[in-house]
Each structure stands twice: as C-alpha cells, then as structure tokens.
C-alpha cells in the first residue's frame, strides 16, 4: 500500500459547499496525522485532514534524517524533551513492526568528542541524561571505540545512546493514515487552505483545489481547527490572528549527501558535538534500514519553503565537518542526494532556545496553533497528538 493511497481529493467528493466537522487538521504531515489519529479515537468526533499537496507527508516529514531521537539535547523542562522521550518509548513499545507495518531499527548512536571542550560537553550530556532524564547512556574512551567502529575517528570520547534508532517515515505515515480512516476520519489531498474566518462558535475554512488545477473552491465549517501545516503554519495562523499577534517562522534548509561507496561499514549513527550556535545538531552520519550511509543535514537559512534543490556547492564544507569523525572521506565519495527545510522560530543570529509552540489561541476557542515543529518532531509526533487531544478533551 502506498502511503498516499488513502487520501482522496476533497473537491470530487462533496456536492455541497458547506460541510460540518468537529475538527479540521490543516496539514497532512506526520504531526497532523498523529493529531488526527488521536482525535478520531474519541466517540462523536468527525475529523478531516486537509493537505494541499498531491500526497501526504511530502515536505518536512519525508525530508529528514528519520532518526528516533532519545531526548538528549534540549532543556529538561521543555516540550521537546518531554515529547521526544515519550515518543521514543511509544515507537519501540507500541509500534510493533509486524502488527503496524512501521519499520524501525534500534541501532544506537554515538556523540563523538575530539577536543577538551567537546569532551566536557559529552560529560555534561551524560550526567543530564542519566541523572535528570533517566535516559540510558554511557561514555566510551577513545581506545575502546576503535575496536567497535574502526571507520570512526574518536580522539577523546563517545557518548553512547543505545535507545536512538531510525524509522521509515513513510511506513509510519501509512500506519497513521490507515488508523485515521479505520476510525472514521477523512484525509483529503489537493486541498489548500486559502482563508479562515471565526464565526463565533465555529470556523469557516475556504479551500482551493490544487491537484487537477481547476481552482475550484469549497468552504467547510468546523467547530475546531488545528494548524499543523509545518512550513506554512505562520501563514495559516496569520489568516485569523489580529495583525499585532502575527507570527513568523524561518526556513532552515538542510542538505543531505549520500556516500557512494558501501565501505567502510558503520553500524551506528555518528553525531559530532553540536555547533556552539545551537541551531542544529551538526552534520551527522546516519544509516537507513538497508545500511546505506548518508550525511547531513547542514544548515543554511533560505527565503522560500520551496527551495528544495540539493546544494552540491556545500559538499566541500560538509567534507570538512564529516572528516573530523569519518576521516577516510574523499571529495568524490559524496553526492548531493536530497534536502529538507525546517520551520524555525529562531531567526538567523538568534541563539536562544525555541521550544515547540503548541497552544489554543486566546480569543479563538478551538483554534490550536503548532509552530516551529522541527526536530525532534518525527519522534515526538504521537505525544504531540495526545497533547493536542488533551487540549480538546482534557
């Protein structure tokens, strides 16, 4: 089953221009689907997912590292940490591959330290994970790492995170989409939201058809709206929020580079100590479920969410970063593979930590905004869904 096969166009299905739903989820990425999956479990809810693209999950949800994060990096009391740890447990304990079709592998991860500064960072990460968050971790000295991963250079130490893994995001979204429709929810594609109006007690959503290029418009009226539109969440939010409350997201493009050779083999995810600007986790080594090595993402702010052409001009800079822990790499070993864009609440030059923004907007009962849902959004998606369900149903 293709992960988009469950979704059908809205405009070919309804003769009436006004259809009532209890909840409309704007955005058919993994977070929007996870929210819809939770809301369709509630008896009496009538849920619709509106996705502007021709398939679900075409943007950030399928253009990332597909890592099941452990929750190591963020402030202890943040939503990112809370949801990441919960999501990690849910994937491993509730999403049995044979029962759900969600493909994942608990392969583990190293965060490698090459300098005194990085060694101190790894030690702080270890104590925070072990004693504040109860996340399984250990530290390996460099002389032990060389026997376990000979291709990886570790000058000082490596923080080992055994609960980090990888997941096939497409199979994950297939599972969520199947559950939604099995529970009576609806997923519609090619339905771009052009306007939202609060009518007092309900919302009118104006949608335009985008798949067949007819430009046909349909209005639906719903009791509640969840804005889970990822890269376009600020635009959706600003359709209804007063001007003085308008919000802005920034577009952080990340390029991924594939290793052409299948050797030397690496069996774990390898991360550097994050850059001091705090904007990313660094250009890391990941593997897919077939063992293929890829590197990324790097980080460059761009002006458009549609800038999805991989930038091969960044290979030299990527090489320099990767060689610090994978020294065998030659310029001809890499090729630009794909890229993704992360919706950030932090502007370029802003190093302040920005947590997930998830809240029911004051003055607009039933309108829930999700902004800045970047990494670890994939890992956190089901807990986010349960959190949003709690906003509506306690």
Image: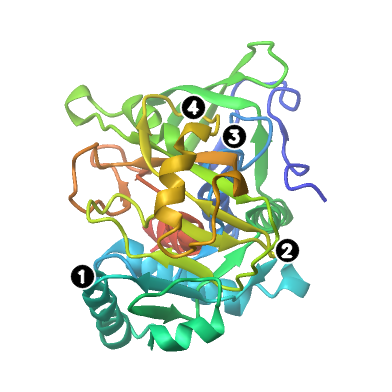
Picture quadrant where residue 13 is located:
top right
Distance (Cα) linking label 4 and label 3: 19 Å
Distance (Cα) linking label 1 and label 4: 35 Å
Q: Nearer the viewer, mark 4 or mark 3?
A: 4
Of the residues under marks 4 and 3, which one precedes in the sequence? 3
Instruction: Name the residue tied to disc 3.
Output: 51
Instruction: Pinpoint residue 145: horizontal percent, then vertical percent.
Output: 47, 83
Residue sitting at 26 percent across and 32 percent down?
247
Q: Quadrant of the C terminus?
A: bottom left
Picture quadrant where residue 207 is located:
top right
Mark 4 and mark 2 residues within 8 Å of each other at the beta carbon? no
Instruction: Pinpoint residue 69: horizontal percent, then vertical percent.
Output: 46, 67
Picture quadrant where residue 238 is located:
top left
Q: Is residue 15 visible?
A: yes
Residue sitting at 43 percent across and 81 percent down?
160
Q: Element type at marker 3?
A: loop
Above or below for 250 versus 156: above
Instruction: Name the residue tied to disc 4.
Output: 307
Of the residues under marks 3 and 1, which one precedes in the sequence? 3
Above or below for 103 versus 163: above
Of the residues under marks 1 and 2, which one precedes in the sequence? 1
Q: Nearer the viewer, mark 4 or mark 2?
A: 2
Q: Nearer the viewer, mark 3 or mark 2?
A: 2
Instruction: Pinpoint residue 292: horizontal percent, then vertical percent.
Output: 67, 59
Mark 4 and mark 3 residues within 8 Å of each other at the beta carbon? no
Residue 290 bears which disc, if any? 2
Instruction: Name the residue tied to disc 1.
Output: 117
């Amino acid at each position: 089953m293709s992960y988009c096969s469950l979704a059908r166009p809205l405009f070919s299905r309804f003769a009436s221009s006004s259809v009532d739903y209890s909840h409309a989820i704007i955005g058919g990425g993994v977070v929007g689907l996870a929210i819809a999956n939770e809301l369709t479990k509630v008896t009496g809810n009538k849920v619709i997912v509106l996705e502007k693209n021709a398939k679900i999950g075409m943007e950030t949800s399928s253009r990332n590292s597909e890592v099941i994060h452990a929750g190591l990096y963020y402030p202890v009391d943040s939503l990112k940490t809370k949801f990441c740890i919960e999501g990690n447990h849910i994937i491993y304990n509730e999403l049995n591959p044979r029962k759900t079709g969600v493909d994942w592998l608990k392969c583990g991860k190293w965060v490698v330290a090459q300098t005194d500064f990085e060694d101190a960072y790894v030690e702080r990460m270890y104590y925070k994970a072990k004693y504040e968050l109860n996340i399984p971790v250990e530290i390996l000295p460099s002389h032990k790492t060389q026997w376990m991963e000979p291709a990886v250079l570790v000058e000082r130490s490596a923080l080992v995170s055994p609960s980090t893994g990888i997941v096939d995001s497409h199979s994950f979204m297939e599972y969520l989409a199947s559950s939604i429709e099995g529970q009576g929810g609806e997923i519609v594609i090619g339905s771009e939201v052009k306007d939202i109006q609060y009518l007092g007690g309900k919302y009118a959503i104006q949608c335009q058809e985008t798949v067949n290029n007819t430009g046909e418009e349909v209005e639906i009226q719903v009791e509640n709206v969840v804005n889970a539109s990822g890269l376009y969440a600020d635009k959706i939010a600003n359709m209804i929020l007063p001007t003085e409350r308008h919000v802005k997201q920034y577009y952080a493009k990340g390029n991924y580079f594939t290793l052409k050779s299948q050797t030397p083999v690496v069996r774990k995810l390898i991360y550097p100590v994050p850059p001091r600007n705090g904007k990313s986790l660094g250009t890391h080594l990941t593997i897919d479920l077939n063992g293929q090595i890829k590197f990324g993402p790097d980080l460059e702010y761009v002006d458009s969410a549609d800038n999805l052409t991989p930038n091969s001009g960044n290979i030299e800079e990527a090489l320099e970063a990767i060689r610090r822990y994978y020294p065998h790499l030659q310029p001809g070993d890499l090729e630009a593979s794909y890229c993704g864009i992360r919706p950030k609440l932090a502007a370029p030059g802003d190093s302040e930590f920005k947590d997930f923004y998830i809240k029911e907007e004051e003055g607009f009962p039933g309108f829930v905004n999700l902004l800045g849902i970047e990494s670890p959004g994939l890992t956190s998606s089901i807990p986010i869904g349960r959190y949003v369900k709690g906003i509506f149903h306690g």
